[in-house]
Image: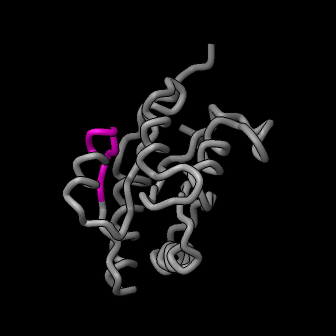
């Protein structure tokens, strides 16, 4: 994992992006936040493609917060591609979405999500969820060893 403990937010809804930024700020989580507004941009970022050509794909974020309903490439397909590649297979992925559908939850876990968290609609509760995710994934959790290029 990268030393910077960067957070990758994969979210297309501007309101949810803003809410997440505010919740991180309020929770005093100062980690760099990278936002990918669709599935294609997220994969480009992770693999150093497209507008992210030249970015070291070995410098992974500490965590990816993944919405399921995304333009271009849907969230579950982003997850499947992350898990299919040896360079990103170990990246912690938390599905953070409005869906509480049992089929989405099952597909997320079967696809290799580390966690599935429904987005609360209330800001105070949303902020608490973001704070708890940050505490667990950025501080308490022991990240997997970085995969060596070669």
Q: Residue 34, image x and y in percent? A: 63, 58
Q: Which residue is drawn at the image coordinates 49% and 35% (left, top)? A: 81
- Residue 67 appears in the picture as rendered: yes
Q: Does the segment drawn in magenta span residue 111?
A: yes
Question: Residue 53, relative to residue 39: is it above or below?
Answer: above
Front-most of 124 and 121?
121
Image position, residue 96 (x, y; %): 38, 62
Q: Nearer the viewer, residue 119 or 140?
A: 119
Quadrant for the C terminus, please: top right
Q: Report which quarter residue 49 is drawn in.
A: top right
Residue 37 figure quarter: bottom right
Q: Looking at this view, name the residue that lies furthest to the left.
A: 102
Location of residue 98 in the rendering, given as x and y in whole percent from the top left corner: 35, 70
Q: Quadrant of residue 27?
A: bottom left
Q: What's the magenta region?
A: 109-116
Residue 83 covered by magenta stretch: no
Count of numbered marks = 0
User: Which x, y percent locates residue 138?
Assistant: 44, 54
Q: Is residue 150 left or right of residue 56?
A: left
The one of 129 and 48 positioned closer to us in this rendering: 48
Residue at 43% from the left image edge and 33% from the top image edge? 83
Residue at left offset 55%, top offset 54%:
8
């Amino acid at each position: 994992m990268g030393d910077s403990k960067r957070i990758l937010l994969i979210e297309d809804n501007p309101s949810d992006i803003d809410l997440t930024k505010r919740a991180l700020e309020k929770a005093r989580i100062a980690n760099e936040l990278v936002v990918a507004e669709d599935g294609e941009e997220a994969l480009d970022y992770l693999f150093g493609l497209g507008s992210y050509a030249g970015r070291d794909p070995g410098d992974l974020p500490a965590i990816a917060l993944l919405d399921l309903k995304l333009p271009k490439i849907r969230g579950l397909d982003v997850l499947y591609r992350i898990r299919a590649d040896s360079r990103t297979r170990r990246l912690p992925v938390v599905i953070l979405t409005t869906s509480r559908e049992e089929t989405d939850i099952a597909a997320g876990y079967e696809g290799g999500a580390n966690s599935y968290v429904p987005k609360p609609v209330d800001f105070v509760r949303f902020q608490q969820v973001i704070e708890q995710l940050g505490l667990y994934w950025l501080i308490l959790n022991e990240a997997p060893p970085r995969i060596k290029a070669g």
